[in-house]
Amino acid sequence: MQPGDNEWIEAWTQVALFMGPFVLPILVGVLTALVCRNEHVGGGWKQLLALPIKYSDIFLGKFLTVVKMVVISMVILLILFIGFGYVKGIEGSLPLFTIFGFVLRGIFACLPLILLQLTISIRAKTFGIPLAVSIVFTLPAIIIASTPLGQIYPWTQPMLAMSPEDESPIQSYWLFYSLVIGTFVVLLIYGLRNFVKRDTI
Amino acid sequence: MNDQILMTNDLTKKYKKHTSVDGLNLRIERGQIYGFLGPNGAGKTTTIRMLLGLIKPTKGNIEIFGQSLKKNRLQILQQIGSLVESPTYYGNLTGRENLEAVRRLRDLPEKRVNEVLEMVRLSKVANRLTKEYSLGMKQRLGIAAAMLSNPDLLILDEPTNGLDPSGIQEIRELIKELPEAGMSVLVSSHLLSEIDQMATQVGIINNGKMIFQDSIERLRQKQKPLLKEQGIKADLQNDFLWLSQTEPAFVSDMNASLVHSGVSVYRLEEVKRTLEDIFLELTGTEGSL
């Protein structure tokens, strides 16, 4: 820690280091598997798809449900972070908007990953496979983060977005967010097509 | 009465080499309870999934309410209520909450929830968690969900599967009342006795092919008085003799000749074939029943 650094930002770096590369990607894996589980167990998909609702709406509904759960998780994280920060007596003024910005960016960078995990969860029919995929691809995230591939690797994107600038290997944020949006669009089209064209579920 | 609400032409579904449904021509008219009968694995569920657009036919087309299912899936499904195999629920929600979820998805008036709960006689347990429901209650809740939109056509796949006799009876009574509420019903089953007691029209499917489709009366007409020939040698061991003719003259002659030749006949009985026998004869299968 250098003189002049805000203690709160430094504390957040520690949170982001743990949350970004590990907890958040795996949490996304768990939540997406969860919203599909009830449909896989005992043929809920059939009931849902036999209703007069567009397939794409069902897919987007599942997606938004996971987004909502991720948002709630992050809000809880934020509240606990600030709460414990005060309890532990972190010095300096709380840069609420900066921290809030990290959280928002983390959620935003989760979106491609949510789509990808959702597509896998719909296909897989079990709780275990999407979870295994989530863990296997999350583990190397911290290594991949420092390679050029990191910016389009969905399991790494949340971590890159959540870290304060001076801790992140990202050169151009403009490029990074374009890549996140690009990944999102590709995965959205792929996931939707995959779901709408499916024959047996 | 020639008001067809469901019609399939040459409906076929192939899975790789296996043909699950083969050239099916279903015809359902308004107000009918159509019993869709066949042994397990005959293609009933595959057909029903195609009717609901859950899987795509390999060949053939489906018309419901005079519209092509391929082109107007959403409009058609608006007017259909369905129960495909055993339904699942959110176990930690009450029966009423589960119906409320479907109601919101379909954007229906709130009062319908109470109405259908009343219809399936679940009002008393509506506020209990569905994970505490018995199988019969779950099945009735599934039918309630299917009826929520007050559909013109109700498609019920094996609605009595896994129920005990009283549960079966309840569902059967419920289904029989539906045409009065203006609903036509397609109900599948592998049990003839069930279809026999509620259907007005019967379609029998075996190995993916329709082998009988007509009114239940026509099926019953096949139940002529007949004595089964079961091979006299085997029956002699059990003191039974089976004959295929029942003309009084023939039987009395037969009786006389038996008595005269020293065989004591203590009982003559006419045995009608049951619908079950006819069904088995038509499908040629016994194992799955």
Image (spheres, coloured by chain):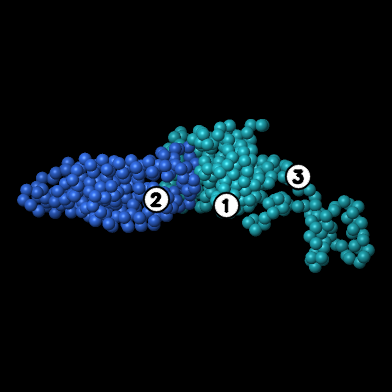
**Measuring 63% from the left and 35% from the top, which residue is drawn there?**
B29
- Chain letter of disc 2? A
Q: Label 2, secondary structure: give it.
A: helix
The answer to whether dots 3 and 1 both sit on one chain is yes
Callout 1 crowding tier (Cα within 10 Å): few <14, some 14–19, many ≥20? few
Q: Label 1, secondary structure: give it.
A: loop
The percent coordinates of residue B105 (x first, y second) are 43, 38
- Image quadrant occupied by the C terminus of chain B: bottom right
The answer to whether dots 3 and 2 both sit on one chain is no
**Measuring 11% from the left and 52% from the top, which residue is drawn there?**
A89
Colour of chain A in the image = blue
Q: Nearer the viewer, mark 3 or mark 2?
A: 2
- Image quadrant occupied by the N terminus of chain B: top right
Q: Which residue is mark 1?
A: B17
Q: Which residue is mark 2?
A: A121
Which of these two is toward me, B103 or B289? B289
The percent coordinates of residue B21 (x first, y second) are 60, 47
Q: Are marks 3 and 1 in contact (CB under 8 Å)?
A: no
- Chain letter of disc 1? B
The answer to whether dots 2 and 1 both sit on one chain is no
Rendered cyan, the chain in question is: B
Q: Nearer the viewer, mark 3 or mark 1?
A: 1
Work out how far the residue at label 2 is from the one at label 1, CA to CA, in angstroms. Answer: 29 Å
Work out how far the residue at label 3 is from the one at label 1, CA to CA, in angstroms. Answer: 37 Å
Q: Amino acid at mark 3?
A: Gln
